Image (spheres, grey):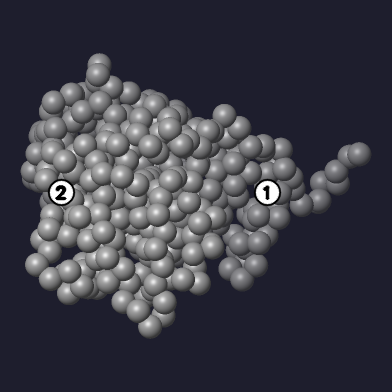
Amino acid sequence: MSIPSNFPTRRHLLGAAAALPLLSFGAVLRAAEPDLSALSDITGAARPIDAAERAARLARAQMLMKAAGIGAVLIEPGSSMIYFTGVRWGRSERLTAAILPVEGEPCIVTPFFEEPSVRETLPVPAEVRVWQEDQNPLAVVAGFLRDRKLAGRPVAVEETVRFFASDGLTRALPGVTIVSANPVVRGCRMIKTPAEIALMQIATDVTLAAYRWTKPRVETGMTGAEIGALMTAATRKLGGAPEFALALIGEASAYPHGSREVHRIADGQVVLMDCGCTVQGYQSDISRSWVHGAASADQRKVWDQVARGQQVAFAAARIGATAGSVDDAVRRYYETLGYGPGYVLPGLSHRTGHGIGMDGHEPVNLVRGETTRLAAGMCFSDEPGIYSPGRYGIRIEDCFHMTDAGPRWFSTPPQSIDEPLG
């Protein structure tokens, strides 16, 4: 069937939608739906973390606890609880906590009426102890420690545990020594296994595929929110769980996380996108920058400088090097170009990269002064952007994991502003 010349194409609908603030969001997605329907789930090879790997995690944690003289680790709901116990739960004023003892099975402490639901998400052998609404949950934690003969040994608290929980434990177990659980939790989570890296690779593949679908559909007049909506929709169709889809346009790209002002696509403007998703709980994080229409000589120069800065960081990421030395290498290079010094703008105002895994940002960071040494299994973002307030910013971000032979990319960085997706 022929299409009349005045019939609105998807391209026309996308452009028109951008001019209708109250209707554009849904209009953009409706216009894109025929193209979205052609996408399919690419996560079929993803394998969830199995029982053997969870058992190995607990064994490693207990080995590290023994080495540090720690009797138990206290964890609240979040990624660390999922990592060690598989329990997926939310935080509220009612405490649910996991206790990892230096020997034996862990314990989950939870409200009585929540026990059936908690057990539904519990894939590892563990004791479950409950508390009633008129009881003190930290007294239940203390009772477990006494029963396991651990009351006289230091209790390590995971770094995101809220004050009321750690303070409540000191009241329920007078004389207890509270220490940081970082040597144990970080000692496990910072070193990714092949199974974890495989999931992060699939998440990366989803995000790259979503970028490749989204970029050709970016039209003059669209807002960052509309572009992000397309990216999010594509990510879902490809099998990822969207985490964020930031699209910064023009001057907003000069501010790493954007501005409150609404900017619309126009020729000659930088588009900076920062997007990620999860697959089986493991994250991706990729940033891409390009110019809508023709790039100026200055935009090309800065894009090439950022691309080189990313490679400088990658080259500095060697087994045994400190995480801070990677950031130092980038700043030395940028200062030779006249940026900075240090974190001063125009230049690189944020760290060169961050750890990544189950959380989008995990310890440790590629930042000045960080003395942790790089080891096989560590995973990082590499994102040394350059920002000029009032003008524009460029960021190219890809993640890598450390191997015995050095760093290896999850996604291959782009080579040119003309082919910005790589």
- Give the numbered dot on residue 114: none
10 Å neighbourhood of mark 1: few (<14), some, or many (≥20)?
A: many
Q: Position of residue 82 (x, y in %)?
A: 40, 50
Q: CA distance from mark 1 to mark 2?
A: 55 Å
Question: Which residue is at the front of the view, 399 or 109?
Answer: 109
Task: Give the structural element (helix, strand or loop) at label 2.
Answer: loop
For the point 60% across and 40% down, which residue is it?
238
User: Is 232 situated left or right of 312 in this image?
Assistant: right
Callout 1, which amino acid? Ala
Say which residue appears at 67% left-offset and 60% top-offset: 27
The three-letter code of the residue at mark 2 reads Ile
**In front of the other: 13 or 410:** 410
Does residue 299 show up? no
Q: Which residue is mark 2?
A: 70
The residue to which callout 1 is attached is 32
Q: Are marks 1 and 2 in contact (CB under 8 Å)?
A: no
Locate residue 124: give its quadrant: top left
Q: Quadrant of residue 379?
A: top left
